[in-house]
Amino acid sequence: MTNSRNLPQIKKMNWKVLDSRYVYDKKPYMVMREDSVELPNGARIDDFFVFEYPEWVGVLPITPEGNIVLIRQYRHGIGRVCYELVAGVVDPGEPLEESARRELLEETGFSCHTLFPWITASANPSTHTNLCHIFLARNVECLQQQQLDETEEIAVEVVAPERAKAIMEGGEMMQSLHLAALWKYFSTLEK
């Protein structure tokens, strides 16, 4: 086992940006920047790409019976249908909790009285500027039909905790940030 006291100490960690230019801009979904940087040891990287995404929110909805509301949708990047948590992009100026409530209602028709901040994580802190803020919603109830965008095809499934674990372990859920939130949830139930 590595002892942290034996690791080399890093005195200065921030990179110095020498030049920066935007190479792709499709707001609000993605902006790509190319930076030329100098590392603290003097090494240079002339083409370090940074993805400027807006903040993301997600919701882990739990029914009064302890079941979990999941969604399924096609994900073109990997070419398959996957289970996920409710999630979406935070609109400019929109408070995180308000965004999470909006996404929950739009994608599932479910609502909740109280949201709890659950986990905040980065999809890739090396190249992504944004964070994903996932909330835990307890005692959710279905109030209306889904209000999907024209480009969304989302199936809603309310599953027992055992089924949610099987989905995760069976590779039917691929979104790592959603998996992290669910694993945290299950680890707290076991305590």
Image: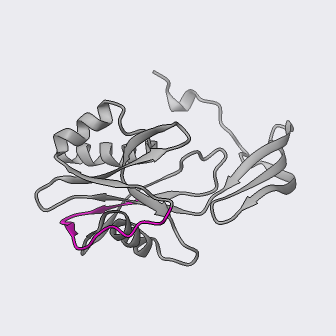
Where residue 148 sits, quadrant-wise, is bottom left
Asked whether residue 161 appears in the rendered view, the answer is yes
Q: Is residue 149 magenta?
A: yes
Q: Is residue 64 left or right of residue 16?
A: left
Asked whether residue 191 appears in the rendered view, the answer is no
Highlighted range, magenta: 134-150
Tell me if residue 25 comes above or below residue 115 in the rendering.
Answer: above
Task: Give the residue displayed 22% in from the left and 64% down from the top.
Answer: 138
Where residue 43 sits, quadrant-wise, is top right
Q: Is residue 108 left or right of residue 48?
A: left
Task: Give the residue displayed 73% in from the left and 46% down from the top.
Answer: 12
Q: Is residue 116 magenta?
A: no
Q: Which residue is farthest front?
A: 150
The image position of residue 62, as x and y in percent, is 22, 58
The image position of residue 88, as x and y in percent, is 47, 61
- Magenta stretch prevailing secondary structure: loop
The image position of residue 172, as x and y in percent, is 35, 36
Tell me if residue 81 comes above or below residue 67 in the rendering.
Answer: above
Task: Give the residue displayed 63% in from the left and 60% down from the top.
Answer: 29
